[in-house]
Amino acid sequence: MLAIGEFSRLTHLSVRTLRRYHDAGLLEPATVDPASGYRYYGADQIPTAQVIHRLRELDVPLPDVQRILRSPDPGARAALVADHLRRLESELDRTRAAVASLRRLLAPEPPPLAVELRAVPATRVAAVEDDVDQADVLTWYSGAMAELDAAVERPTGAPGGLYDNALFEAGRGHLLVYRPTAEPPRRGRVHPMTLPAVELAVTTHVGEHDDIDVTYGELGAWVVANALAVAGPVRETYLVGPRDTADPAAWRTEIGWPVFRVAPR
């Protein structure tokens, strides 16, 4: 049997941590001296202690650690760990997005935004559209764009999307993705339509979409400074994206805000 100090040295876990694991019911000593209260561990408990340590390093909640340790099924244990890793990856993505945005926002001299006022004629497209929750946009977009890719044989331009104002203001709104084509098909959710002519204030977002909200903000500030007002859903055009290249630095997304000139006060 190993005294708690010896067990601590072998597992690189502090005595305090081992006591905390005991109190939480994660790792109970093999025996406790009833007179002195000293804790003693078996050598066969070393791997268990190390597993607990790794799980806690990954911030696995104590109840989940208990379920993992007590599950006799290796598949169930692996599924619990995989679920937590997916949550960690999602949190890491949010952290990276926040860091990218902050770096741009806190830059001492951000580069001037290049904006173009562009008259876009009516465009014939194949489209997929629906009302979508903001949290489901990426999943919905992937499915809709896959349908368009399969249905449109001869696109005449880059794919794009129209994002209803309510999507940003209320967290749910109308979303339409499209591919320009002279002969739009009707297949499944894909249907033909004509996008109306519009005047857009257009800028290009470079790279991943982690900080695309900053580009939206900069474009909005430019619109206000130039006495323009937004009129209608935002348009995005995916000139180069993850469907074209795995290199995020090469991605280019045009953001176009339908605008009209505001009369001077």
Image: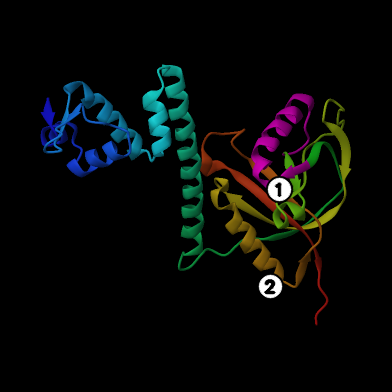
Alpha carbons under labels 2 and 1: distance apart: 22 Å
Picture coordinates of residue 38, whole percent (x, y): 13, 36
What predominant SS class does the magenta segment belong to? helix
In the picture, which quadrant includes the C terminus? bottom right
| Disc 1, SS | strand
* Residue 139 on the magenta segment: yes
Which residue shows up at 51% across the image and 50% down it? 97
Q: Circle 1: is it few (<14), some (14-19), or many (20+) Cα within 10 Å?
A: many
Picture coordinates of residue 34, whole percent (x, y): 15, 34
* Residue 138 on the magenta segment: yes
In this view, 152 is above or below 17? above
Q: Circle 2: is it few (<14), some (14-19), or many (20+) Cα within 10 Å?
A: few
Picture coordinates of residue 252, whole percent (x, y): 61, 45
Q: Which residues are magenta?
A: 131-158
Which residue shows up at 46% across the image and 21% down it? 76
Closest to the observer: 35 or 66?
35
Residue 153: in sight, yes or no?
Answer: no
Residue under circle 2? Answer: 225
Residue under circle 1? Answer: 236
Which residue shows up at 29% across the image and 35% down it? 53
Count all numbered tags in the image, as a single digit.
2
Picture coordinates of residue 249, whole percent (x, y): 51, 43
In this view, 186 is above or below 106? above
Mark 2 is on which residue type? Ala
Is tag 2's residue or tag 1's residue first in the polypeptide sequence? 2
Mark 1 is on which residue type? Glu
Tags 2 and 1 touching, CB below 8 Å: no
In the picture, which quadrant includes the N terminus? top left
The quadrant holding residue 9 is top left
| Disc 2, SS | helix
Furthest residue to the bottom? 265
Give the side of residue 7 with respect to residue 120, left or right. Answer: left
